[in-house]
Amino acid sequence: MGLLFINACYREGSRTRRLAEHFVNQYQGDVKEICIGDLEVCALDRKHLEIYNKAVREHTFTDPMFGYAKEFGEADEILIAAPFWNYSIPAALHAYLELVCTQGITFDIQADGQYVSMCRGKKLTYVTTAGGYIPEEDHGFGYIKSLAEIFWNIQDVRYYKAEGLDIVGADVEGALRQALKTSGTDIISGAAETTAGV
Ligand SMILES: Cc1cc2nc3c(=O)[nH]c(=O)nc-3n(C[C@H](O)[C@H](O)[C@H](O)COP(=O)(O)O)c2cc1C
């Protein structure tokens, strides 16, 4: 399928989106974009949880709500872009990922309790920007990284972030360029060479 671009930066003039475009433009192959801001994704409320649990039990995933997980499982590579909101990720992205994490579509659990990935992709890039500074205990990237490594067995997880963008006097353009320049150095597993193009 190529690159699945999960775009959760839908604010007009989004800086996160500008970072993400760098990776979209670099990708050689088909790109499918999902705009999280336009989806009517429901969190797993009572009604949808019943559908979800029944489907997982019976291994029958006919409800349209499972379309996101199926699409995710077929992607060769994943790009997620989201602003840092309330020390985490936007709720709409969380609701979407809740559906992507459907046991029997994107991962399964073996008899010995081990997770086994059902995803084709082996690389995931996460891009974010923050108005202030992201603490060491990073609930945005930390959450994405856990899902990638544990459920989907994606070990090549890369992280690009630009921080302090809403601080008075911030050099926003410089921070965006720096986010791409410093890629692969700190919490990114698997160093990546990029040239800034924001
Ligand atoms: C709902 C909401 C919650 C936010 N929460 C945080 C936060 O917890 N920490 C922070 O540093 N900035 C926070 N911000 C600021 C954004 O992280 C910052 O403006 C970011 O660059 C927005 O990305 P964008 O330009 O792609 O929309 C928040 C902004 C919004 C709208």
Image (cartoon, rainbow, N blue to C red):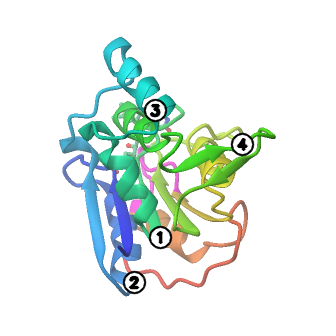
**Amino acid found under the numbered disc labelled 2:** Gln
23 lies above or below 136: below
Mark 2 Cα-neighbour bin, 10 Å: few <14, some 14–19, many ≥20: few
Q: Can residue 194 be seen in this view?
A: yes
Q: Mark 3 points at which residue?
A: 58
Q: Which of marks 2 and 1 is in front?
A: 1
**Magenta-highlighted residues:** 162-172
101 left or right of 152 in image: left
Is residue 122 one of those drawn in magenta?
no
The secondary structure type at the circle numbered 2 is helix
The answer to whether the residue labelled 2 contacts the one labelled 3, judged by CB atoms less than 8 Å apart, is: no
The numbered disc on residue 26 is: 2
Q: Work out whether mark 1 precedes mark 3 in sequence or the reverse, and give the earlier one.
A: 3
Q: Name the residue under label 4.
A: 136
Alpha carbons under labels 2 and 4: distance apart = 29 Å
Q: Mark 1 points at which residue?
A: 77
**Amino acid found under the numbered disc labelled 3:** Glu
